[in-house]
Image: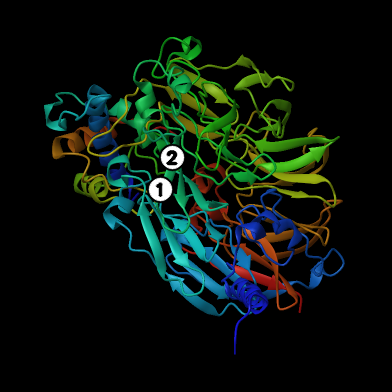
Amino acid sequence: MVSMRAALMACGLAAALAAVAALASGSARAETGQQTTSLDVRQLFATSCGWCHQSGGRTEGRGPKLAGTDKSDEYIINQIKKGKPPGMPAFGGSFNDEQIHAILAYIRDLKDEP
Amino acid sequence: MTLNSRSLSLFAGAFAIGALIASPAYAVDPSRLLAADQNPNDWLTYHGTYRSYHFSPQEQINASNVRQLKVAWMHQPGRATRGLQSMPLVADGTLYYSGSYSRVFALDGATGQVKWSYFPKLDDELVAAQTHSPYNRGIALGMDKVYVGTVDGRLIALDMQTGKVAWDTKLIDSKKLTVGFTGAPLFVKDKVIIGAQGGEWPWRGPIFAVDAKTGEKKWEFFTVAGTEDAKASWGGESWRTGGGGGWMPGTYDAKTDTIWWGTGNPAPLYDWSGPDWKTKGPRPGDNLYTTSVIGLDPQSGKLKFYHQELPHDAWDFDSSVGEFLLLERDGRDLVVHPNKSGFVFVYDRSNAKVANVWRLVQNINFVQDIDPKTGEMKGRRDLVEGSHKNLCPAIAGGISWNTGAYSPRTGLYYKIGQEWCMDLEVIKTTPILEPMAQLNIGANFKLHDPEGGKAYGHVDARDPITGEKKWEIRFPEPPLSSLLATGGNLLFVPDARGVLHAYNANSGEELWSHNNGIGHVGGIISYNAGGKQYVAVMTGWGSLVGDEYPALFGGNYANMPKDSGALVVFALP
């Protein structure tokens, strides 16, 4: 579906940021995402993306099912960056390209089950 | 002519009287709000009056003639993203309402003719990055102004006559915190009160009071760790990202000079430490004052009393939803407040001591019971890290933020109950704060039907104090709109499919219905303009709970527009 790729990317980025922010929690400034070597996208979904992309992106809920999406990489990346108003926020200012690609990889790995 | 002392005193007296007559009276003087239940023609504040009954004494439209009710006029605000979620207000025949993006309109209540409109300039880039946006739940009237909050963290006052901006006060750094205001403000005495979004957003959810004349912030009360005692109920530094908030309007009790308000849930919503929550997990402790009802002093914003409806809320069943009914029973002043979980709390109005607790909703298993005498939770279902099946109610709650209605004529409280459950996997999360705050949920979840049947909704007619049920009306999908009761013995229910129903408020018999063509997620009021009674309802679909409907219920919801809505006003021919 149209917003799935973007949503996935957004979730990945959010996950990356989540990890970073976790480290920074309680301190004045967070480290930048670029310093994160591994991104726990599963944790990202439970933090932010799962609000809409339920069951970790495996089922339809407020947002579309991400597992098994037929959208292109480019589509997903763009969707995460720009969002799809009113439902999907724009995460372009929140995630870097490396983080977005990590989310994309997570989405591609999701098993498409009923 | 010579002036002697007698002439002088006569002159002075006349001058004084003249000055009094000439002094400008406010259109909506605070005294009018206090006496609102004696003015049946208007709807001066979000909940109708400070008693929060969502009741209009108007009788012109009644159970014997409502069959003739038809559309009198409509207004289309445009850009109704996520539907129209607000409660219209009426003063002296003029109707005021807000749409998405905090657009505000003043209309002739009899004809719908636009008197003025105001569209604030919002931070569009910020709005595009928000989830709980760009809907607006309503406005306040007070003195000579209309007050509205924005999702980019401002409170704006507009001249009632012209719509011109009187002041525009920034209260929240929304660019950093991502949250702003979606709730309606409340006018109290000489101040405008408004609560920030919070809950799953990792900050501290303040409630603000702003001087109505000048726009100057007078006080703020942090719903998360707002006192030293409260800070002690948050382990470590977890209070900094605690959530909370007060995103729906409470009410004002003049008798005790107290603002009653409901607070949001803590973040993360789900706690991986399960039953060890007092000492372990992301936010050890009771987490005051989240998921609480609080009483604040209007002058200072200081806390007078509180009751935490769910200590260490681990299910997102906040107290920021719903109304605060001011009722008397057997010589006792009481307050009735529904909690999102589907339990309804009854409090002593002087100190928020629990007087009773009753269940509106059937599918509840997050707790075995709540003691009706003390409010103590018995048999909490705390969920450790890992998978869990069939938590009830689901995250969408046993009730949602839309209000019920109380009729002093029937003595019945009408309220929507929601029956659904969910599976979830609780996962350790950490708050995301940079470059801007993100949601902190703490689990992946999936809503589903309750065991033994399909998810559904019901409008109950109950005794507000005892909870005794008189009747219920079932809906295949829970209505998500507020309700209206009237002196004409009517109960109005705008449903999720788009049909506005009118029922006999005593018996629950359906008397009339009209299809507005799109679901309802906003308010409904009744008022009088030019001697004629009107019923005004917000139409439009797309609230966050409504977003669940395509997956849960299918049908028309997959294609129901989320960018449309209109104010539709009915009257007798």
Judging from the image, what secondary structure is the residue with disc 1 in? strand
Query: Are tags 2 and 1 found on a single chain?
Result: yes
Which subunit holds the residue at mark 2?
B
**Does residue B337 appear in this view?**
yes
The 10 Å Cα crowd at callout 2, few under 14, some 14 to 19, many 20 or more, is many
At a point 16% along the width and 28% down the height, the residue shown is A31
Q: Which residue is mark 1?
A: B217
- Residue B413 vs residue B380: left or right? right
Q: Which residue is mark 2?
A: B220
Percent across and percent down for residue B570 are 69, 71
Mark 2 touches mark 1? (CB < 8 Å): yes
Percent across and percent down for residue B246 are 50, 40
The 10 Å Cα crowd at callout 1, few under 14, some 14 to 19, many 20 or more, is some
Out of B116 and B276, give the one closest to the viewer.
B116
Percent across and percent down for residue B106 are 53, 72
Colour scheme employed for the rendering of this structure = rainbow
Out of B548 and B13, give the one closest to the viewer.
B13
Question: Which quadrant of the view contains residue B272?
Answer: top left
Out of B524 and B114, give the one closest to the viewer.
B114
Question: Which quadrant of the view contains residue B530?
Answer: bottom right
Where, quadrant-wise, is the N terminus of chain B in this rendering?
bottom right
Spatial separation of the CA atoms under disc 2 and disc 1:
8 Å
Q: Specify the amino acid type for callout 2.
A: Glu
Where, quadrant-wise, is the C terminus of chain B in this rendering?
bottom right
